[in-house]
Amino acid sequence: MPSSSAVAPRQSALDMLRWWAFVAIFLAHAGPTLTTLAPATFEKLATLNFALLAVGNVAAQVFFTLSGYWVIGQLAAEKTRTGRVAVGRFWGRRAGRL
């Protein structure tokens, strides 16, 4: 019989790592735009564009890996809790988060 108390625990360290990956991705995309919009202000950052793009590529891999880990954990917890995975409800919850 499935346990009704099984819930995937939050892992704060992984949530924080995922958040920092998002910030790195955002900066990788925003960095080149900021340097062209306000060159005087962001002149010193222009040399960081290449580094930001490199970090952004790694950060995207980290972000998607952690996101997949989180989603699978949620599905596993639902399977443990209810004995099955409701695919329609899963996609409804995912769409609701967007």
Image (cartoon, rainbow, N blue to C red):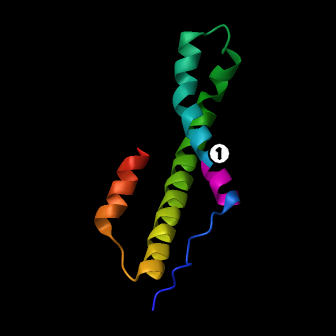
Q: Residue furthest bottom?
A: 1
Q: Amino acid at mark 1?
A: Trp
Q: Residue furthest top?
A: 40
Which image quarter is the C terminus in?
Answer: top left
Q: Is residue 16 magenta?
A: yes
Q: Viewed as shown, does residue 8 lie left or right of 78?
A: right
Image height check: is 9 above or below 59?
below
State the residue in front, 51 or 95: 95
Q: Is residue 34 magenta?
A: no
Which image quarter is the N terminus in?
Answer: bottom left
State the residue in front, 81 or 34: 81
Measured as percent of width and height from the top left, residue 93 is found at: 39, 55
Disc 1 crowd rating (10 Å Cα; few below 14, some 14-19, many 20+) is: some
Q: Which residue does the image show at 47% across and 75% down from the upper left?
A: 76
Identify the image quadrant of residue 6.
bottom right
Q: Which stretch appears magenta? A: 13-18
Measured as percent of width and height from the top left, residue 10 is found at: 63, 63
Q: Viewed as shown, does residue 12 lie left or right of 77?
A: right
Residue wearing tag 1: 20
Q: Which residue does the image show at 52% across and 20% down from the upper left?
A: 33
Q: How many marks?
A: 1
Image height check: is 81 above or below 26?
below
Q: Which residue does the image show at 66% across and 15% down from the upper left?
A: 42
